[in-house]
């Protein structure tokens, strides 16, 4: 169990340490990392919501780091490159 937690911490630190300096890489990461959870759904039957599947992304142990990386990329594109980032939202 200890080694698993250690590995998780190493991956979290690695994701946190990624710096963005390349516009192409930042654009790619913004396209690959979704702005909202792709698993959240409403199941409708005859126009009425029958079942709601909640967002499951927060179950991912690296969720915070991945969202932070996407935010870094968006900030880099907007602040450093002057790019319109509304296409990624």
Image: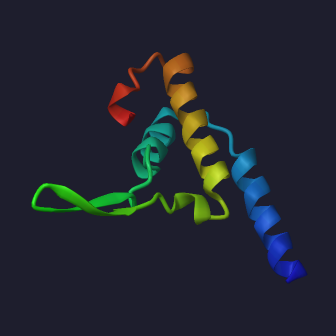
Residue 35, by quadrant, is top left
Q: Is residue 86 rendered to the left or right of residue 72?
A: left
Does residue 83 appear left or right of residue 61 in this picture?
A: left
Relative vertical location of residue 50 with respect to residue 23 in this rendering, above or below: below
Q: Quadrant of the C terminus?
A: top left
Left or right relative to 55: residue 58: right
Q: How many marks?
A: 0
Q: Residue at x 51, y 31 (%)?
A: 74
Is residue 76 depicted above or below 18 in this figure? above
Q: Is residue 12 left or right of residue 3?
A: left
- Image coords of residue 40 (percent x, y): 39, 58
Task: Answer above or below: position of 38 versus 75.
Answer: below
Q: Position of residue 16 (x, y in %)?
A: 73, 47
Residue in front for this viewpoint, 35 or 27: 35
38, 16: nearer the viewer: 38
Image location of residue 80, percent across then percent down: 56, 19
The quadrant of the rendering that contains the N terminus is bottom right
Which image quarter: residue 49? bottom left
Residue 25: % across, % down: 50, 42
Instruction: Identify the coloring.
Output: rainbow
In the picture as drawn, the residue positioned furthest to the right comes out as 2
Along the viewing direction, whichever of 85 and 82 lies nearer the viewer:
85
Q: Residue at x 43, y 47 (%)?
A: 36
């Amino acid at each position: 169990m200890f080694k698993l937690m250690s590995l998780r911490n190493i991956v979290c630190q690695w994701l946190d340490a990624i710096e963005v300096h390349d516009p192409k890489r930042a654009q790619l990461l913004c396209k690959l990392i979704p702005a909202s959870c792709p698993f959240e759904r409403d199941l409708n039957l005859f126009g009425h919501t029958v079942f709601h599947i909640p967002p499951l992304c927060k179950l991912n142990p690296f969720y915070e780091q991945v969202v932070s990386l996407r935010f870094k990329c968006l900030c880099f594109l907007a602040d450093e490159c002057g790019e319109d980032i509304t296409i990624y939202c």
